[in-house]
């Protein structure tokens, strides 16, 4: 991993206010709109407010993590890959740097959403549960960071928003972020378990219901991250070979 490259990327992306506003503001607004009316009701051994808070935390994490797809597509369009071929940055280091960048971008969204959940919606959890929920939500961004890399190297710059938006909407739907899993039609429940968003939601919500992480879900999510990360490396290699 090249720390200089990572630091440069973090600085550059944090200056893009549009990315930060979309990934931070939208989940926060949805949390307040959806979570406020029934915040005192209970659902699956927790409050509706806490359940929706975690759902919107995952929504923001997915959005922030896949947001790198647009910057990668732009880099390809301006020939940045040709410049990378002249540096010591190998494909593995490049992918790791992009994934770490995505994890950094996820933090503001999670902090804002969980801060609003605690202060505005009155979510009350034990200290241990707060920590587990936050870590689970943060780590759940890993496969989506790799997915953003793949999208950035497959889609063209002029179509990246449409491709990313459609895929993101479908993953959020199947992950149970808009509709709880047990209220989905049966065929959607079957499909959902073959998506990373389902397991990301499972990892983040498990502490609310059981007080601990679901390690089976953690392993599945890590498997998704490894597979998607490998595909991302291959796409980077193929793209730079043509550059």
Image: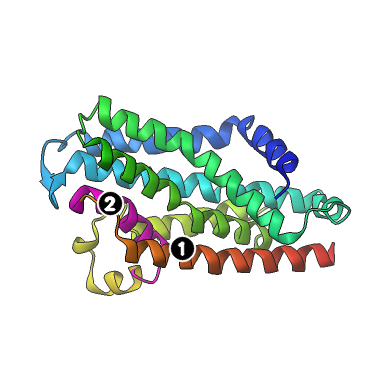
- x%, y% of residue 126? 21, 37
Instruction: Identify the image quadrant of the C terminus.
Output: bottom right
Numbered disc in front, either 2 or 1: 1
Image-quadrant location for residue 218: bottom left
At x 62%, y 62%, the residue is: 150
Q: Where residue 222 is drawn, which disc sits there?
A: 1
Image-quadrant location for residue 15: top right
* Residue sitting nearer the eye, 112 or 182: 112
Disc with the residue nearer the chain's start (2 vs 1): 2
Please determine whether, in this image, residue 221 is positioned above or below residue 64. below
SS at badge 1: helix
Read off the magenta span. 193-210
Is 198 magenta? The answer is yes
On the question of residue 156 being in view, the answer is no
- Identify residue for label 2: 205
Near mark 2 (Cα within 10 A), the count class, few <14, some 14-19 or many ≥20, is many
SS at badge 2: helix
At x 51%, y 44%, the residue is: 64
Disc count in the image?
A: 2
């Amino acid at each position: 991993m090249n720390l200089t490259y990572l630091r440069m990327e973090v600085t550059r992306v944090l200056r893009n206010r549009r990315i930060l506003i979309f990934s931070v503001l939208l989940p926060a607004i949805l949390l307040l709109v959806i979570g406020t009316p029934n915040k005192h009701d209970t659902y699956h051994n927790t409050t509706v407010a806490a359940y929706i808070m975690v759902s919107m935390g995952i929504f923001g994490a997915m959005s922030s993590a896949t947001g790198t797809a647009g910057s990668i597509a732009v880099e390809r369009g301006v020939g940045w890959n040709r410049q990378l071929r002249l540096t010591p940055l190998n494909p593995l280091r490049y992918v790791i740097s992009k994934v770490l960048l995505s994890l950094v971008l996820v933090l503001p969204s999670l902090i804002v959403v969980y801060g609003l959940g605690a202060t505005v919606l009155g979510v009350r959890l034990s200290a241990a549960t707060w920590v587990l929920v936050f870590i689970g939500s943060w780590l759940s961004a890993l496969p989506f960071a790799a997915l953003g890399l793949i999208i950035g190297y497959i889609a063209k710059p002029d179509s990246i928003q449409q491709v990313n938006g459609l895929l993101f909407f479908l993953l959020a739907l199947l992950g149970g972020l808009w509709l709880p899993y047990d209220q989905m039609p049966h065929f959607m429940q079957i499909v959902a378990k073959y998506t990373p968003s389902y397991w990301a939601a499972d990892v983040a919500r498990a502490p609310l219901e059981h007080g601990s992480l679901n390690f089976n879900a953690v392993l599945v999510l890590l498997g998704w991250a490894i597979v998607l990360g490998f595909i991302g490396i291959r796409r980077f290699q193929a793209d730079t070979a043509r550059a």
